[in-house]
Image (cartoon, helix red, strand yellow):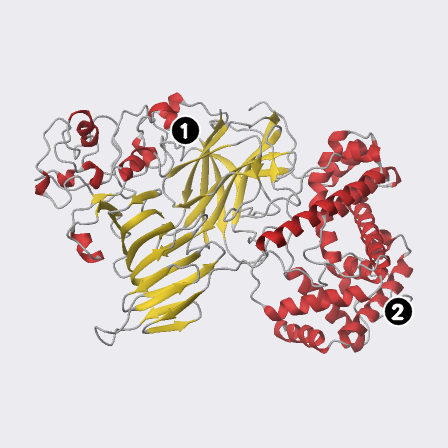
Amino acid sequence: MRSGRGGGQGRGQGQESSGSPECVRVEQRLRRAADLILTREVLPGPAPLPDFERLLRRGRGGRAGRLVLLTGVVGGVALASMILLGGRRDVSYVVDGPVAVSGSVVEALASRGAESPPARLHFSEGSEIALSSGARMRVVNRGLHGADLLLERGHAALNVTHRAGARWSVTSGPFTVEVVGTTFSLDWSPADERMVVDLTAGRVRVRGVSVGGPIDMTSGERLVASVRDHRVTLAPLNAPATTATAAADAPAVALAPPADRAVAPPPPGGGGDGATPGAPGSGPHRRTSRSSPARAQAPGAGGTRRTSELALASPARVAGRPAHPAPSQEFPFTVAGRSPESPDLSAPTPPAAATPYPETPDLRPSTFAAPVVPTMTLGGGGVFCSRETAQYRFEQPEDGISVANVYTLALANPDLDNTHSWCGAGAVRLRASFTDQGRRNYFGRYLRETGQMIIRLDRPTDFTGRTVTMHVFVEGPVDARFSAEIFVVHQGHWVGSEPMRELAPGRWWTVKHTFKALNPTGGSDSSNPLPYPGEGLSPVSACNRVSLAIRTTGPRLNWTGAVYVDDVGWR
Amino acid sequence: MAESKVILFDGPGRRGAIADVELVAALRRREPRAYAAAWLDLGPSVRRLVTRFFGPGAETADLAQEVFLRFFRRIDELRTPEALRGFLAGICLGVARNELRRVRVRQWVRLTSTGEVPDPPADAPDMEAREALRRLYRLLDRVSAQDRSLFVARFLEKMEMLEVAEAHGISYATAKRRVARAMTRIHKHIERDPALGGYLDGVGELGA
């Protein structure tokens, strides 16, 4: 190490490091120590804007008082948490029967005889899972209220104890079954990419990209979902097919094509749950999901009800008519009138006995005239373009458009584009480069795991009670999955929506969120999972920015492509 | 919306040296908008420096606010607006040193109630590196605030020696001398911790 008097006026670190071998060694060690800190550094997250004018007037006394108050509040919360959480533990489990256990993976071995007990997992709160021979299940996560399970293959029968706040989920392939308390069985065939859910009691919700949106199942229903041919069947549980293979042979109906291309009319009363035609889980798909055959099968049901159900009739149950092709990116979009493949709504329905699932609903949306000739990428908004006026339509360059470049770096180069559009002829195109490597940000996410487009508003805007809507289209690999969240920024507080998960490239998605007077900041599975320092709630009465966050999720986290954003509005 | 004129802080038009001059001028005029602009643009780097000084998991919000309050009060002392960021870094290091001394005086030597450096809010599979990091910050807890500040400035902020001198309000020669002494002292502590020393040497071998 050189002494202070030695050496010239070299300013760079490299210049300062010359000297004896021992000095070089010292400096190299300290540099490695610094690298140890820097490579594991978590970048600080956004922080609310302090009221500097008031603080500058007040001086230091106020800060000390606030610290005392803050310490008291934190201490109180910590004490309350200790009291409330004392003695509570995550659910635990034991296994019995012919199983092989490796870490959190439980694999049921072949049964040694009829009298041999099945492989079972017994959870501490009373829930039980029986695995058929050859089934393989992973307990991914355990918590106070339940566990997240992954059925890698085979058949599992679950009996989840109903408790207040229970949260269980079972994932198989791209599907997730969310459970509160119920009895059901799950069958997943990785080779066929097919899942069968038999719900004996209770309610479950099935999510997954191939499902199109959350499907709520009630007791006595069977859901068969196939990744390969994009089909979902919701049928009575007492139907003939009992396995994934057999169920697949039953006449399935085509999965709903992107609802945004369906340009269906809004549901009466503004949509009820706030879903929009472009949003997954909304519109016709959702209604047909709830129109289970069990409910629609009542013989003699006629009149208005029957007519309304016939409007959703599947060609699969019309004798002599071919089933709809599986929806894909080449799914024919009907501009006006009925699809040539759609059944004649005035025609009588064949007898129920004609097919095993005579009332299986068609998950395709009905078709209406669109004001522009749509394609996969243009005119996705259809008739809604004339009904809903967005504040930002991106038909021409807009000021204040940027991307976040500190904590979320996956999106870059915002530019006007005319190849994709929800309404009109223009949208914002952003270059996307997602990866799950490198440094992590304040929220524990990789820097390029999330990207954000930011719109800086020209005046403070009150979003209380307002619904912000954005439309997003992603170009990327077919197996890429992403989530989308809307954020508004109130005096530095980033207030986000619940992430819209398991979205897939190749279609327009509608993301919307209604903000309340006080909104939680941060949330599990969000791109901003942590609440802001010291504060969990924020108003949205004076926001100066609106943002859309796209986060890569699913099995493929590294991909490049483009994100198009169009028609950003609120009302 | 199209006619709105806003300053971009997030995008490619991020402020540079020229805008620093404008920002300093606005701060000297005590314009409230300038306070917000300074916080938005310079806040992340201040919080990052504070985090580097105290270690992961340290509470940075109050200290960052204190840094900016001092920065706004002392803005008239800034001779050349182009040196804004160095000036702010110097204030930040000063606040951090004072905070460390204050904490030590109060016998709150440790960063947390348990004395452990909190892990980042992400899963960190490299247990060895995590342990090395914990040991490194424990080691830094044992050196003086001045030595720690010099280490942060020189090796974490990668300041050049002249910048180190300016940030600490000392001459160039004094800065060189003190940095050299700080390096020696910190290295002695590393020598006393074979696990940490071995890890750092191992990283070097892997890197080579």
Determine if residue A522 is in view.
Answer: yes
User: Where does the image place residue B71, in percent across and percent down from the top left?
Assistant: 82, 41
Which residue has dot 2 on it?
Answer: A3
In this rendering, would A284 be left or right of A492? left
Which residue has dot 1 on it?
Answer: A425
Chain letter for mark 2: A
Of residues A134 and A30, the one nearer the viewer is: A134
Rate crowding at label 2 as few (under 14), some (14 to 19) or many (20 or more) other CA atoms within 10 Å.
some
Q: Amino acid at mark 1?
A: Ala
Of residues A570 and B25, the one nearer the viewer is: A570
Of residues B89 and B68, the one nearer the viewer is: B68
**Looking at the picture, does residue B97 appear above or below residue A6?**
above
Q: Residue at (35%, 42%) from the top-left corner?
A: A213
Q: Amino acid at mark 2?
A: Ser
Chain letter for mark 1: A
**Looking at the picture, does residue B139 appear above or below residue A507?**
below
In this rendering, would A129 be left or right of A352? right
User: Where does the image place residue A168, in percent across and percent down from the top left?
Assistant: 41, 53
Tell me the tag on residue B174.
Answer: none
Tell me the quarter of the picture where residue A346 sits.
top left
**Looking at the picture, does residue B207 appear above or below residue A394?**
below
Q: Residue at (50%, 54%) from the top-left corner?
A: A435
